[in-house]
Amino acid sequence: MDNNVKNIGAKAQIDFHCLDANCTGVIEFNLADISRKNFQAVCPKCHKTYEFDAVLRDKLSRMLKLVSAIRDAEDILGDSNVSVNVAGGSVKVPYALLLTRLNTLITLDLGDKKVDFHLWIEPSSADTFR
Ligand SMILES: [Zn+2]
């Protein structure tokens, strides 16, 4: 893992709801943490532990690279808009809004269950997207 990818870790946060039906805990961790060999996610409420298998770790580590690429392109994205066609014309949505205002949910297999992982990406500085 190069420094560029490491540096981004603090700003790419993942969370998911505890799979225990009686628990309302939310497990949070930094995307970069999953690269640690002994990484284990722990529910702060019921202390259930989650082991991530190789497939899931691989997907999350590639997600980290994607976040890194987005971070690297922040200055370009800050000038970019997504054009959405609507009745009567089109609406421009700045990429900045997509990255900072929308919740990204990634549904992945955790053991034998489908789990929605909630991804939070923050720009490297508050001034990046104004
Ligand atoms: Zn729990």
Image (cartoon, helix red, strand yellow):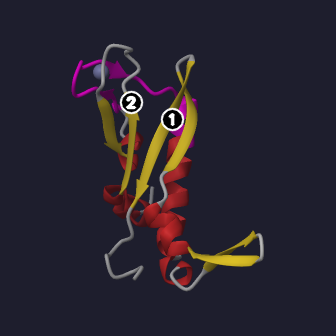
Residue under the image location 57 percent in, 16 percent down: 112
View extreme (bottom): residue: 79
**Magenta stretch holds residue 45:** yes
Observer-nearest residue: 77 or 6?
Answer: 77
Q: Is residue 16 above or below residue 95?
A: above
Q: Which residue is mark 1?
A: 116
Q: Are marks 1 and 2 in contact (CB under 8 Å)?
A: yes
Q: In the rendering, at what x and y percent does residue 116 appear?
A: 51, 35
Report the amino acid beneath label 1. Asp
CA separation in Å, label 1 and label 2: 8 Å
State the residue at coordinates (53%, 50%): 63
Q: Residue at x 49, y 77 (%)?
A: 74
Indicate the position of residue 82 as horizontal and vertical percent values: 65, 74
> Where does the image place residue 125, in percent across and percent down from the top left?
32, 75
In the visual, does 34 lie left or right of 86?
left
Report the quarter where the C terminus lies.
Answer: bottom left
Outermost residue, front side: 88
For the magenta stretch, what is the residue range? 38-59
Quadrant containing ligand 1 reads top left
> As drawn, is 54 to the left or to the right of 15?
right
**115 above or below 8?**
above
Q: Residue at x 41, y 23 (%)?
A: 51
Viewer-proximal residue among 84 and 9: 84
| Local crowd size for mark 2, using a 10 Å CA cut-off: few (<14), some (14–19), many (≥20) | some
The vertical placement of 5 against 127, above or below, is above
Q: Which residue is mark 2?
A: 17
Element carrying mark 1: strand
User: Which class describes the residues within 10 Å of circle 1: few (<14), some (14-19), or many (20+)?
Assistant: some
In the visual, does 44 lie left or right of 94?
left
Indicate the amino acid at tag 2.
His
